[in-house]
């Protein structure tokens, strides 16, 4: 529940909403997110959004990304509806559907009517609706002084939907931008059951936008007249308080937060005391702060709690550990962070700068004097620029802290932040009980009770010891289990961290072993360890609100997981017995020594067999149809009766069967709601998150792998994924066999309580034909058509077993990972080379997935280039090198093995691991193949340098680093930005700069005629002789030279540091020289640009003058023709007298001057001197013209007075104010 959800008897919960328009500004969007937190809003309705974040489940935006609905509180987005209309999106939050709209002024009336029709379609479908946004429509109903056509259409749509206008008062929501006048264009409407017009507040806070923030509440009890009066009074008090806050600009953040809290308390009384966040909601289970765990303190607490004596029973062990946890760690009082805390980059400095902007804006708007208004506008621009710079600096400093954290922990906070764009941000969990019960009912269906009567024929009495065939619990086994427990796994309902259980077992294995052995002897799984806490994880890319959009995980107690591991070890001893394995050889999931690679290879081998027949001879299976079947909600619908039957059929010892019966009996599921925890009995499924569940699934699912199938048809299983391999000679035979095989599988599924998802079935027809035909077959009531490629277990299977599609997809995915992790790798800061390599390995792991299957793709040039392109980006950032460094050099400097060599190495290692007579360990095989990779890499490195067309940089790097193996096996030394320049030759050397067009000459500034390369600057140039004598041993017995550079670098850490320091001094001086030269070049370029701009403006003025002359001549000719036509038959007009001609000429001259002055005022105004000079020139011309000229000047002055008569300062002030307001 969130801060402002009103929960009352017989009322609908309604979150407070905040509407705003960022106005195409990054600062405006940043400020509105902070303002929503300060106002404790739950929903943010935005119009004209700048750029919504990626993979953020809190944001719902339209297809054009112009409008958005943001869940800024603790309520999640339950559903999203996107319309084909631009500028429209609807999202359900807290049971209320919020429709965010933006209708730009450019829409004509017909387009606006179609836009409203789209809103009607969304509004009619929901009982509780809020429609809000910027409609650019005016109507007296919501406070506008006049009504326009768009306002009439919008008001008609509101009446048609039966909505109520929430807008109150006549306070402008659009403050104007210098062109458009202030108006009320931001409006909101709501259904009568949730409308609260009394809560409408137009905030005066600074927004960095043309629009103001609007706050209102939906839901709750309708206001009384007294509340309406109190609302008006509190609004006035709020305005006075805001003025006081503007005068106190130097207050600290604590004082600001107190004032904001006081301002929040002055909101309508209906909002006070009813907030769900203020009301403590009880959660299932307990939690401790595992970061405070100390093994020594916990050990002392266990001794004080008499753990050894109390651990003889399950209740005593849990009670002792709970007491020890309370003694050593604090309880977690809030499971999730407050969503209304300040945004991470906010600070007291930003709060003061925002107040400065607010004061400067109000002064600019309230000043009537034009000169003072100009000064206030300049101050406002300065304050706004300072705020913008401060926001960027705050974000930059915080990100720099994340970069520094990456040095200590490569996969810490910095890694999680940069990867959040790919994996998605954390979204609030669903808490509505009705919604949760619907989702959980779909995910955890009820099955009939399981009948374990087959165990009654065992000659034992209930509760007696039955341990025949079950190995006893040993201390070594418990210690091994404890050592494999991860410390940071989420705990179950008891809240005991894994680290605490791990410490207790490793210190007291005898006491723990006695308890677990007693459980096995009695074949009893303790009831407290059968409780599971449900966590619903949203699936990325799935629509919210659907049951299939969540992955249900069951959090189990760590002590119970230890017992599950003991049971699993004994169960695997029986099922995976080498002499007689009892699981199908075609099941590759959750089994030791098997993986997705083995399953994919099985499918690929069958496809290659089909492709080996290149002629149709009537008997060879030339086609292979691979059908990938999907099971609905597989693990949660596993039938317990089927598991019990399969356990008995596989001859599992009776003691284990009895233990598993106890494991399944009376299992309960806890899930948290806004009304508190709810308990639900579980009657089917294996818990996702348990240790024992995957093996129990394999036992039940093993039956589908043995169903009778058509001839030569094979089924491959990995967990719940099934792949049917259907070979045939013709496509008709393929279709017939596929439908028969699918029917057999579907029949088995129905018998065991499972169900296929026909709509998710995919198929690909593998054949040697140049264009394989498409095959259509039926899965249930759905017709499935084969495609050119499908995705099977993370690999793209193509109809010709070509791997270009797969390489393309993994390269795109790895590129996104590289773009994310390399943000932490800066040239002059960030993690060292070893930590940076760890981050680069994340992208490499994406590329290397299932590499043994598709390693042959590295022989294709296009695939090889795509893989290298991705690794090169990561290698350049790891090595801190220039982006122009070639791939081979970058990977060598970064210490990364070339990706193609690495993929081939994985294939060789996998092939040797599958050898039946393998004697070497995995580590030995990997070490041997890595040496083979280094040897092959060395041959390519030498060959590249010996080629005739090899670049000088390639030859230089090979000269200074000739041995790849020695460089890769070094134990010290981190690459730096300066050392990478020396080793690669790409740096601030004039030869490199000239080659890329940055300088005119490659020669050294001191050595005439000698190109300034890395060799010259680092080893030859006299400018750096002192550096070489001090750090590189020049003049000594063993100086550093290009041929001995690698030997000196690898000698020891001190030698590496001295060479790095020398490279830093030399390249830094070269960089400063280049900066000075670049600054001088920039000045020349600016001067040339100014001259070019002036010349271009003169040419444009000449073109305009000629065009105006032609236009005026044509107009005079047309006027003369019309005059002659009107005078048809009349005598010609006599010529004008000299006095009349002189008066007309003076009038035309006066009009031309007036137009010129008006044109200048419209542009940027004229300087006072220019105006005075123009006046002097006019005065001299009028004097020369005699009395008529003086009379004309008097008339001009009178016209200027009637037109406003602005002097130069006033005109400049007007222009300044207009520019500022824009």
Image (cartoon, rainbow, N blue to C red):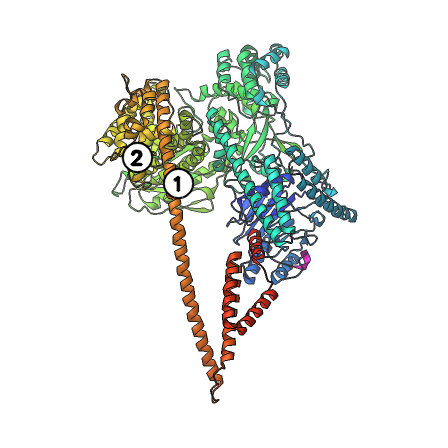
Q: Quadrant of residue 987?
A: top left
Residue behind mark 2: 1005
| Residue 653 in picture, x, y percent from top left | 49, 19
| Residue 99 in picture, x, y percent from top left | 60, 50
Mark found first going from the N terminus, 1 or 2:
2
Q: Residues within 10 Å of mark 1 (few under 14, many from 20)?
A: few
- Label 1, label 2: how far apart the Cα atoms are: 17 Å
Is residue 1081 found left or right of 490 in the rendered image? left
Q: Quadrant of residue 626?
A: top left
Q: Residues within 10 Å of mark 2 (few under 14, many from 20)?
A: some
Give the label on residue 61, or none.
none
Between 345 and 1173, the residue placed more toward the observer is 1173
Tell me whether the residue at label 1 lies in contact with that at label 2, contact meaning CB atoms closer than 8 angstroms.
no
| Residue 137 in picture, x, y percent from top left | 61, 58
Residue at left offset 44%, top offset 40%: 743
The vertical placement of 202 against 428, above or below, is below
Secondary element at tag 2: loop
Between 975 and 791, the residue placed more toward the observer is 975
Give the label on residue 1079, or none.
1
Queried whether the magenta region covers residue 570, the answer comes back as no
Q: Which residues are magenta?
A: 137-143
Residue at left offset 58%, top offset 68%: 1199
The vertical placement of 958 against 1036, above or below, is below
- Residue 901 appearing in the image: no
Between 271 and 36, the residue placed more toward the observer is 36
| Residue 229 in picture, x, y percent from top left | 77, 48
């Amino acid at each position: 529940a969130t801060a402002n959800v009103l929960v009352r008897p017989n009322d609908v919960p309604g979150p407070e909403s905040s509407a705003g328009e960022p106005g195409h500004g990054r600062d405006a969007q940043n400020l509105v997110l902070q303002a929503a937190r300060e106002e404790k809003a739950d929903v943010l309705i935005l119009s004209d959004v700048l750029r919504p974040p990626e993979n953020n489940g809190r944001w719902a935006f339209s297809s054009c990304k112009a409008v958005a609905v943001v869940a800024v509180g603790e309520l999640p987005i339950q559903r999203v509806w996107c319309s084909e209309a631009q500028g429209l999106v609807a999202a359900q939050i807290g049971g209320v559907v919020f429709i965010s709209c933006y209708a730009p002024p450019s829409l004509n009336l017909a387009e606006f009517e179609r836009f409203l029709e789209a809103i009607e379609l969304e509004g009619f479908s929901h009982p509780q609706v809020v429609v809000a946004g910027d409609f650019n429509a005016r109507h007296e109903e919501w406070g506008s002084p006049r009504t326009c056509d768009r306002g009439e259409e919008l008001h008609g749509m509101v009446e048609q939907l039966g909505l109520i206008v929430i807008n109150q008062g006549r306070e402008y929501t659009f403050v104007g931008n210098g062109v458009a006048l202030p108006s009320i264009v931001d409006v909101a409407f709501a259904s009568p059951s949730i409308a609260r017009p009394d809560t409408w507040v137009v905030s005066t806070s600074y927004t960095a936008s043309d629009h103001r923030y609007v706050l209102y509440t939906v839901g709750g009890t309708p206001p009384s007249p007294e509340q309406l009066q109190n609302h008006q009074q509190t609004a006035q008090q709020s305005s006075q308080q805001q003025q006081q806050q503007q005068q106190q600009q130097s207050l600290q953040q604590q004082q600001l937060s107190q004032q904001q809290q006081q301002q929040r308390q002055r909101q309508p009384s209906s909002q006070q005391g009813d907030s769900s966040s203020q009301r403590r909601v009880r959660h299932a289970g307990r939690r401790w702060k595992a970061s405070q765990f100390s093994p020594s303190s916990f050990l002392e607490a266990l001794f004080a709690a008499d753990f050894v004596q109390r651990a003889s029973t399950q209740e005593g062990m849990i009670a002792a550990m709970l007491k020890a946890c309370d003694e050593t760690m604090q309880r977690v009082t809030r499971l999730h962070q407050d969503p209304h805390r300040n945004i991470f980059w906010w600070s007291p400095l930003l709060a003061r700068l925002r107040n400065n902007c607010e004061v400067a804006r109000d002064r600019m708007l309230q000043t009537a004097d034009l000169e003072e208004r100009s000064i206030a506008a300049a101050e406002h621009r300065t304050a706004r620029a300072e705020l913008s710079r401060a926001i960027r600096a705050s974000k930059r400093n915080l990100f720099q802290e994340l970069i520094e954290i990456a040095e200590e922990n490569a996969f810490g906070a910095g890694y999680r932040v940069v990867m959040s764009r790919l994996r998605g941000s954390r979204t609030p969990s669903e808490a509505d009980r009705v919604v949760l019960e619907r989702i959980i009912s779909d995910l955890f269906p009820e099955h009939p009770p399981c009948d374990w009567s087959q165990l009654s024929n065992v000659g034992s009495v209930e509760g007696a010891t039955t341990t025949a065939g079950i190995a006893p619990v040993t201390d070594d086994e418990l210690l091994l289990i404890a050592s494999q427990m991860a410390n940071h796994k989420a705990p179950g309902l008891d809240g005991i961290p894994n680290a605490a259980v791990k410490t207790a077992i490793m210190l007291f294995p005898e006491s723990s072993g006695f308890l677990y052995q007693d459980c096995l002897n009695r074949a009893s799984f303790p009831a407290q360890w059968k409780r599971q806490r449900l966590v619903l994880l949203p699936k990325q890319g799935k629509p919210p609100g659907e049951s299939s959009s969540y992955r249900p995980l069951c959090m189990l107690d760590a002590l119970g997981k230890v017992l599950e591991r003991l049971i699993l070890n004994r169960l695997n001893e029986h099922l995976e017995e080498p002499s007689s394995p009892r699981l199908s050889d075609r099941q590759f999931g959750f089994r030791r020594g098997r993986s997705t690679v083995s399953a994919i290879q099985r499918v690929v081998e069958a496809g290659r067999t089909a492709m080996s027949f290149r002629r149709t001879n009537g008997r060879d299976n030339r086609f292979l149809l691979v059908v990938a079947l999907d099971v609905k909600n597989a693990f949660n619908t596993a039938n317990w009766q089927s598991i019990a039957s399969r356990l008995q059929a596989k001859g599992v010892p009776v003691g284990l069967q009895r233990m598993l019966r106890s494991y399944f009996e009376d299992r309960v599921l806890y899930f948290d709601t806004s009304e508190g925890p709810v308990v639900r009995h579980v009657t089917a499924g294996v818990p996702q998150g348990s240790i024992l569940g995957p093996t129990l699934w394999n036992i039940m699912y093993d039956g589908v792998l043995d169903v009778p199938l058509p001839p030569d048809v094979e089924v491959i299983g990995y967990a719940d994924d099934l792949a049917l391999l259907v070979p045939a000679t013709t496509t008709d035979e393929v279709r017939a066999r596929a439908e028969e095989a699918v029917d057999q599988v579907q029949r088995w599924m129905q018998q065991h309580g499972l169900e296929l998802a026909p709509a998710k079935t995919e198929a690909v027809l593998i054949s040697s034909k140049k264009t394989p035909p498409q095959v259509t077959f039926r899965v249930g009531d759905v017709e499935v058509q084969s495609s050119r490629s499908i995705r099977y277990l993370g690999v793209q299977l193509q109809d010709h077993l070509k791997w270009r599609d797969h390489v393309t997809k993994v390269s795109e995915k790895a590129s996104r990972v590289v773009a994310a992790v390399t943000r932490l790798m800066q040239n002059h800061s960030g993690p060292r080379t070893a930590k940076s390599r760890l981050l680069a390995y994340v992208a490499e792991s994406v590329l290397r997935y299932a590499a043994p299957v598709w390693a042959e793709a590295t022989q294709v040039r296009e695939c090889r280039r795509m893989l290298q392109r991705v690794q090169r980006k990561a290698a350049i950032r790891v090595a801190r090198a220039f982006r122009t460094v070639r791939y081979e050099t970058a990977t060598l400097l970064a210490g990364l093995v070339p990706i193609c060599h690495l993929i081939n190495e994985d294939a060789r290692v996998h092939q040797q691991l599958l050898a039946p007579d393998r004697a070497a360990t995995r580590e030995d095989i990997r070490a041997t193949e890595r040496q083979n990779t280094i040897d092959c890499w060395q041959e390519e490195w030498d060959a590249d340098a010996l080629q005739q067309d090899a670049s000088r940089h390639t030859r230089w790097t090979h000269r200074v680093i000739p041995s790849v193996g020695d460089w890769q096996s070094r134990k010290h030394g981190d690459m730096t930005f300066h050392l990478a320049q020396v080793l690669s030759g790409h740096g601030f050397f004039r030869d490199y700069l000239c080659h890329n067009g940055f300088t005119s000459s490659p020669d050294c500034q001191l050595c005439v005629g000698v190109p300034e390369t890395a060799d010259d600057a680092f080893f030859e140039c006299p400018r750096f002789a002192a550096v070489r004598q001090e750090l590189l041993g020049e003049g000594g017995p063993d100086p550093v030279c290009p041929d001995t550079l690698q030997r000196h670098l690898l000698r020891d850490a001190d030698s590496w540091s001295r060479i790095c320091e020398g490279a830093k001094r030399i390249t830094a001086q070269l960089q400063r020289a280049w900066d000075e030269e670049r600054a001088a070049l920039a000045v020349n370029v600016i001067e040339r640009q100014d001259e070019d701009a002036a010349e271009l403006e003169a040419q444009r003025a000449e073109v305009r003058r000629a065009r105006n002359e032609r236009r005026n001549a044509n107009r005079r000719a047309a006027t003369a023709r019309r005059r002659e036509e009107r005078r048809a038959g009349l005598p010609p007009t006599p010529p004008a007298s000299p006095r009349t001609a002189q008066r007309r000429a003076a009038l035309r001259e006066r009009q031309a001057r007036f137009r010129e002055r008006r044109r200048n005022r419209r542009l940027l105004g004229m300087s006072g001197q220019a105006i005075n000079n123009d006046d002097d020139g006019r005065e001299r011309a009028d004097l020369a013209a005699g009395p008529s000229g003086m009379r004309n000047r008097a008339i001009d002055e009178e016209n200027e007075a009637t037109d406003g008569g602005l002097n130069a300062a006033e005109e400049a002030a007007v222009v300044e104010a207009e520019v500022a307001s824009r």
